[in-house]
Amino acid sequence: MNETDESIRVAVRERYASAALSVSSQGASCCSGAAPDLGVGEGFGSTFYSVDDTGALPAAAVLASLGCGNPTALATLAPGEVVLDLGSGGGIDVLLSARRVGPTGKVYGLDMTAEMIELARMNQAEAQVTNAEFLLGTIESIPLADESVDVIISNCVINLAADKDVVLAEAFRVLKPGGRLAISDVVLQRALPEDLRGLMLLWTGCIAGALVIDDYEAKLAAAGFVDASVTPTLVHDRDAIERLATGVTFPEGIEPARVYAEYDGAVANAFIRASRPR
Ligand SMILES: C[S@@+](CC[C@H](N)C(=O)[O-])C[C@H]1O[C@@H](n2cnc3c(N)ncnc32)[C@H](O)[C@@H]1O
């Protein structure tokens, strides 16, 4: 891993450790009334889930939801299947999937941020889910055997990875032949100037590291996946980008107005589907 990739990983881990701690401390102090500000804008979080889904989960699992869609609605999970959630955060998608695959199935949540894994395990205990396991590790080096997983889900994580090719190759490796990928992620509908992609706070906020749709599809094909599709579900306009960039100090020479104009309508939440051939 080169220095830039390592600095991305450190910044991403810092941001999500702090989000996990805000949720845990809110839980510990209890009933403070206001939800913690996790620095996500509209179009992110638990709004993509039905009340039936969220109502049955621990409050902290819902509060910690930082996704950009609902991959559990996209993946048609069957009883007995093995599921892996890449970047499982506070565990919302793992806990929902565990219910769908039932006692004969198993769901793994993988996350590199120790504070998120701790929060997810607390949520698992509270939800009394026994067919799930949270693993501390990176999605660039998945700690599972080849061809051991039926379905990979992920929610707003792959955009954060410095090297998407490595992540997709790992996903392909652990999927069984015929296995499915069902992902929610942020994508770009057009390319952006290179100097705007290196803005770390926009990267850790799930924007600057997003792939252009055609590149996403090309990378899925290069990793060996078939039947790949990337479908935008919600486009972020200038106001949304401005809200997401709240608190970002732009480097000298980068005008915020130019950033907002360039990103306006370029960033979208999307569903990504693909399969490993049989
Ligand atoms: C935007 S949050 C989404 C969390 C969760 N999927 C959800 O929907 O609430 C991103 C999560 O991905 C994790 N993450 C980011 N990059 C990762 C990597 N390279 N390997 C493992 N986990 C990663 C972060 O620690 C964080 O918990």
Image: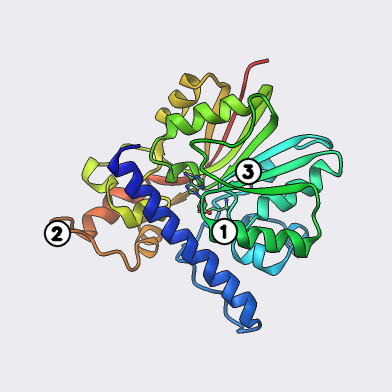
SS for callout 3: strand
Residue for badge 3: 85
Residue for badge 1: 116
Q: Is mark 1 within 8 Å of ligand 1?
A: yes
What is the quadrant of the C terminus in the image?
top right
Q: Where residue 7 sits: x, y (%)?
A: 32, 49
SS for callout 1: helix
Q: Where residue 46 sits: x, y (%)?
A: 62, 60
Residue situated in front as seen by the camera: 212 or 134? 134
Q: Earlier in the sequence, mark 2 or mark 3?
A: 3
Residue situated in front as seen by the camera: 160 or 116? 116
Give me the residue at 69% from left, 28% from top. Answer: 148
> Can the viewer see residue 36 in this picture?
yes
Type of the residue with mark 3: Asp
Type of the residue with mark 2: Glu
SS for callout 2: loop
Residue density around tag 3, few if under 14, some if 14–19, many if 20 or more, within 10 Å: many
Type of the residue with mark 1: Met
Which numbered mark, 2 or 1, is in the foreground of this view? 1
Give me the residue at 60% from left, 56% from top. Answer: 117
Residue extending farthest left: 253
Residue density around tag 2, few if under 14, some if 14–19, many if 20 or more, within 10 Å: few
Residue density around tag 1, few if under 14, some if 14–19, many if 20 or more, within 10 Å: many
What number is the disc on residue 252?
2
Q: Is mark 3 within 8 Å of ligand 1?
A: yes
